[in-house]
Image: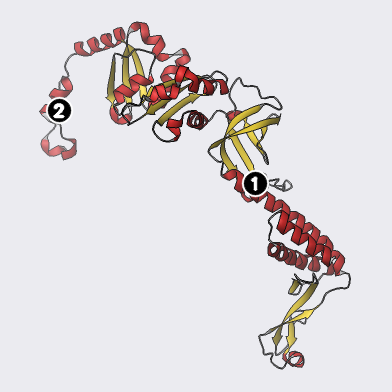
Amino acid sequence: MSKELLNALDALETEKGIKKEVIIDALEQALVSAYKKNYGQAQNVKVTFDARRGDIKVFAVKEVVNEVLDSCLEVSLSDALEINRAYEVGDTIDFEVTPRDFGRIAAQTAKQVIMQRVREEERQMIYNQYSRYENEIMTGEVERRDSRYVYVNLGNVEAVLSKRDQVPGEVYNSHDRIKVYVYKVVDPNENQNAEQNEEEGKKKRRNRGPQVYVSRSHPDLLKRMFENEVPEIFDGTVEIKSIAREAGDRAKIAVFSDQEGIDPIGTCVGPRGERVKAIVEELNGEKMDIVEWSEDPSEYIKAALKPAEILEVRFDREDEHACTVVVPDTQLSLAIGKRGQNARLAAHLTGYKIDIKSESNMEELDRQSEEEPEENFELPETEDVETEDAISIEDIEADNE
């Protein structure tokens, strides 16, 4: 067995990259447990493996004491001196206790340890490989699906595409090749702990490897696609400032370039629309609105609400990122969009809460506001008012105006 074991360790180190010392250390620990289990010995034991000859030996470790209270753990000073005159109280001595049939147990244990270590190393290698692709796009092949996931083969690992990460209306058939966004790769050890703690009372499940989570609906999938299709985005000439997306239906992308002579929208669309067309085809016809980002919130909001014409943007509560947008009466439904989609995406893109009013409605509200009677303000006594809460005549007049 020793020669076969040494050959197996050498092969693992060459083919799998698993260091021999790592397996030997795990093997020695496993053999200690196997010895205690099979021979009912509770004393301190250690197992050594000769990496040159392949010999396995078991030793009982005993402490040198003046008076022996437990013969399994201790040896008297007089007995120790018979072995070596240099021993003193407090030293430890290794006594070989290798059973005659221990070779059979060692062979079984070695096989289990090597298989387990190989599985662990393969899992870790796969994790190291795919963790580098986190937040990136990969192309995979649909293998199968169940009530919870669509399983996508990415090469050495099977990724999962949950229902919330799927695009409504898309059908994923076996052997379909799709582009997916890798948004999370779970470490094998973390995944195992999560599975073990998922439900008390159930049998602990063994981890089958790193778990890779992918998405087709994530906004960053769109970002990575534009980076792949538009070299100017990849090299930083054009920057994607924000993305709002309702997967499978419509998306808005805000782009910007600080270089003169660069049209960020035209750059993303490409000659005859080829660049954006490739992305739309990959996403099965999802509509794309590409708008230019602006430092001026008013201009940015107007651009975000395209194709509707905007007459005015009023920032009623600017600190709360809220505004009222005035549009021509004929443009109201276009600005709001089907089921409110255009307004919803614009709000998400800009980060503002947008209230859309028609021109006639806004004029009526302004007229009502002007016709309201002036309120009479009663100034409080100066001594009863805190400095920070005091109201000035100028403030009141400004409010009335």
Query: How many labels sit on residues?
Result: 2
- Residue 340 found in image quarter: top left
Q: Position of residue 281 (x, y in %)?
A: 56, 20
Quadrant for the C terminus in the image: top left
283 vs 312, nearest the viewer = 283
Q: Secondary structure at mark 2?
A: helix
User: Which residue is painted at 40% across and 23% down in the image?
Assistant: 265
Q: Looking at the image, is 132 positioned above or below residue 48? A: above
Q: Amino acid at mark 1?
A: Ile
Q: Amino acid at mark 2?
A: Asp
Mark 1 is surrounded, within 10 Å at the Cα level, by few (under 14), some (14 to 19) or many (20 or more) other residues, namely some
Q: Which residue is mark 2?
A: 395
Of all residues, the one furthest to the top in this rendering is 330
80 vs 65, nearest the viewer = 80
- Residue 184 found in image quarter: top right
User: Which residue is painted at 19% across and 36% down in the image?
Assistant: 389
User: Which residue is painted at 59% across and 42% down in the image?
Assistant: 185
Q: Position of residue 277 (x, y in %)?
A: 51, 20
Q: Which residue is mark 1?
A: 126
- Can you see residue 68? no
* Between marks 2 and 1 in the image, the one whose residue lies nearer the viewer: 1
Q: Looking at the image, is 140 positioned above or below residue 37? A: above
Left or right of 286: which side holds 151? right
318 vs 14, nearest the viewer = 14
